[in-house]
């Protein structure tokens, strides 16, 4: 709870990027997003942070349910 929101957002995006490139986890995009949102809840966030739509596009995650874009 003492971590700034900006750092939590960056951690969420980094988590998505890392596990998206992992062959086991990143294969199923919906499962990946579910796990990422669970990670965000573990950081104390009720709503997952929004990620830039350009970044989501580069990750191949645009329009995956459960992600918020900005």
Image (tube, grey):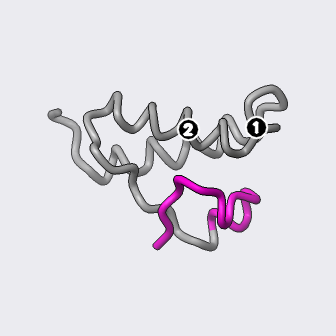
User: Badge 1 is on which residue?
Assistant: 26
N-terminal of the pair, mark 2 or mark 1, is 1
Q: Residue at x 44, y 32 (%)?
A: 39
Question: Residue 5's mark?
Answer: none
- Mark 2 Cα-neighbour bin, 10 Å: few <14, some 14–19, many ≥20: some
Give x and y (percent) for residue 50.
Answer: 43, 61
Quadrant of the image occupied by residue 24: top right
Mark 1 packing: few (<14 Cα in 10 Å), some, or many (20+)? some
- Describe the element under mark 2 as helix, strand or loop: helix
The residue depicted at 74 percent of the width and 30 percent of the height is 25
In this rendering, the answer to whether 63 lies above or below 43 is below
Q: CA distance from mark 2 to mark 1?
A: 11 Å
Is 63 one of the magenta-colored residues?
yes
Magenta range is 55-70
Q: Which residue is mark 2?
A: 34
Nearest the eye: 26 or 64: 64
- Asked if residue 65 lies left or right of residue 70, the reply is right
């Amino acid at each position: 709870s003492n971590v700034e929101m900006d750092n939590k957002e960056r951690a969420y995006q980094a988590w998505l990027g890392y596990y998206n490139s992992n062959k086991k986890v990143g294969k199923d995009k919906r499962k990946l997003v579910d796990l990422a949102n669970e990670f965000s809840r573990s950081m104390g966030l009720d709503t997952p942070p929004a990620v830039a739509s350009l970044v989501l596009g580069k990750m191949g995650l645009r329009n995956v349910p459960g992600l918020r874009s900005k």
